[in-house]
Image (cartoon, grey):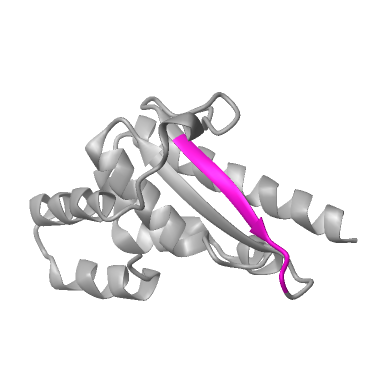
Amino acid sequence: MTSIDDIRDNFELLDDWDDRYRYVIELGRTLEPMPEEEHSAENKVNGCVSQVWLRKLVDRGNGVPILRYRGDSDAHIVRGLVAIVLALYSGRTPQEILATDAVSVFNEFGFRDHLTPQRSNGLRSMVERIKTDAKEALAEAS
């Protein structure tokens, strides 16, 4: 998986939004395949116009929960946005997830001005889902 820092660096190199859109789509192609049985109602993210699924996997190996995700979408551009969200949040502790401001990262990438309101709402829905998972993992760890 591409790191959020690598994505940030690559975005800085791409001036044209057509090139940035192509890059986002390419990021979606790098996602780990999601088994068909994980395309379930439980994993579906509500609030997205496109179909989006996020599968949470919790690793409690060192006593501190680490949240990992698999994700998928039926739309190419959204699949790329899923890849960006996962680069930002997957493999992190609940505390790290709750401390990460996705909106500032998305604004840094220019998404506010270049995504439709529906796509922006979908991004927010994905982030809200992951932050809710982080709060639940913290509550379970207490």
- Magenta region, main secondary structure: strand
Residue 121 visible at all: no
Tell me if 11 is positioned left or right of 137 in this view. Answer: left
Instruction: List x then y, in percent, for residue 92.
Output: 59, 67
Position of residue 10 relative to residue 128, above or below, is: below
Residue at point 43%, 33% (across, down): 52
Q: Quadrant of the C terminus?
A: bottom right
Percent x, y for residue 29?
23, 50
Q: Front-most of 17 and 29?
A: 29
For residue 34, say whether it is visible: yes
Quadrant for the N terminus, please.
Answer: bottom left
| Magenta-tinted stretch | 53-61
Q: Is residue 77 left or right of residue 142?
A: left
Residue 46 place in picture, x, y as percent: 53, 27
Q: How many marks?
A: 0
Residue at the (54%, 48%) spot, across then down? 127
On the rendered structure, is 112 left or right of 25? right
Asked if residue 65 lies left or right of residue 36, the reply is right
Foreground residue, 86 or 110? 86
Q: Is residue 37 above or below residue 13?
A: above
Residue 66: quadrant of the picture: bottom right
Task: Give the image location of residue 11, x and y in percent.
Answer: 22, 66
Q: Nearer the viewer, residue 84 or 17?
A: 84
Query: Residue, x 76% and y 54% (percent of image)?
Result: 137
